[in-house]
Amino acid sequence: MIYMKLSIVIPNYNSEKWIDKLLNSIITQTYNNYEVIIVDDMSNDNSVDIIKKYCKNYKQFRLIENKSKRLSGGTRNVGITESTGDYIMCIDSDDWLKDDNVLQDIVNKFNGEDIMFLGYEMYGGDNATCILNIHNKDEAIKCGMGANWLKVVKRELYLDHLLPEGTLFEDRFNHLELCIYANTFTSLGRATHIWNRTNENCTTLSNKWCWYRFEYCGELYKLIQRVHDADIRDMLIKELVMYMNSCVEMVNEL
């Protein structure tokens, strides 16, 4: 176990229905060496007022309000660059931590690795459970679950590889980039998050999200040009071909 400070970065946009549940799941954690940076992306509901109450009552909480629209990637980047912890953990504002021992279990398992992979239980939908067991670069790159909230990342690595902005496909691209440049990996081996699938405004339930895969293909193509390892290039090319084919299918449906 290493004693470390965790930075919890939460991008918020109109999550008044869920934000209380998330923030309460953090303040009840048994491990308390953490900071919570909540970055609001110009919400027009009551969520900011709710967040301000937590910031007033808990010194570890901090609210940053975007002055212009940044979408998920840019909003997370604000929190990452403002963080002061050793490791960064992202949580979406409509999800919450599974139990009070999540942070303590993460710290107990860490041994200085660059990335730790987590797991989730789904709330709504088919109520599935997914636990990511990943321990090397190949497994990490091939992982189909690239969400930022499914891993804890060393701060220095995140700062060198921030998320793309202006797109809704930011986490998949960032996942690949982080895993390519990370050296060591571990997995917690249990579910840590409750993934809320009942929020009808969720990004991945929006048609807009599907169309952003065109931009993802472009960013992935540029990433391939920067990678010199032949095996990694092959994996990325297969990923690019798969998503390009999905773009063709979308166009054919017009």
Image (cartoon, rainbow, N blue to C red):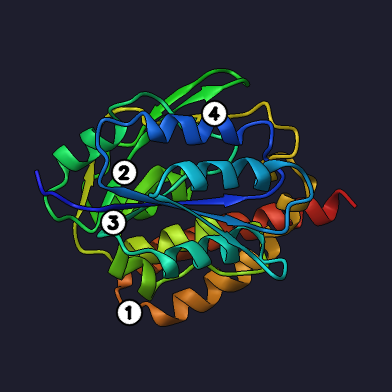
- Which mark is nearer the camera, 3 or 4? 4
Using the rendered view, name the quadrant where residue 226 is placed.
bottom left
How many angstroms separate mark 2 from mark 4 (CA)? 23 Å
* Callout 3 crowding tier (Cα within 10 Å): few <14, some 14–19, many ≥20: many
Question: What residue is shown with label 4?
Answer: 21
Q: Amino acid at mark 1?
A: His
How many angstroms separate mark 3 from mark 1 (CA)? 28 Å
Asked if residue 132 can be seen in this view, the reply is yes
Q: Is residue 238 or residue 7 the one in the foreground?
A: 7
Find residue 228 and name its label.
1
Question: What residue is shown with label 3?
Answer: 87
* Dot 1 and dot 2 residues touching (CB under 8 Å): no
Disc 3 secondary structure class:
strand
Find residue 117 and name its label.
2
Q: Residue at coordinates 31% horizontally, 43% vertically from top-left?
A: 117
Query: Which of the marked residues, 3 or 1, is nearer the chain's N terminus?
Result: 3
Query: Which of the marked residues, 1 or 2, is nearer the chain's N terminus?
Result: 2
Residue 147 x %, y % = 48, 47
How many angstroms separate mark 3 from mark 2 (CA)? 13 Å
Query: Which of the marked residues, 3 or 4, is nearer the chain's N terminus?
Result: 4
- Which mark is nearer the camera, 1 or 2? 2
Disc 2 secondary structure class:
strand
Q: Amino acid at mark 2?
A: Phe
Query: Which of the marked residues, 4 or 1, is nearer the chain's N terminus?
Result: 4
How many angstroms separate mark 1 from mark 2 (CA)? 25 Å
Task: Report the side of 252 relative to 161 (left or right).
Answer: right
Q: Amino acid at mark 3?
A: Tyr
Q: Is residue 230 or residue 187 the one in the foreground?
A: 187
Residue 29 x %, y % = 32, 31
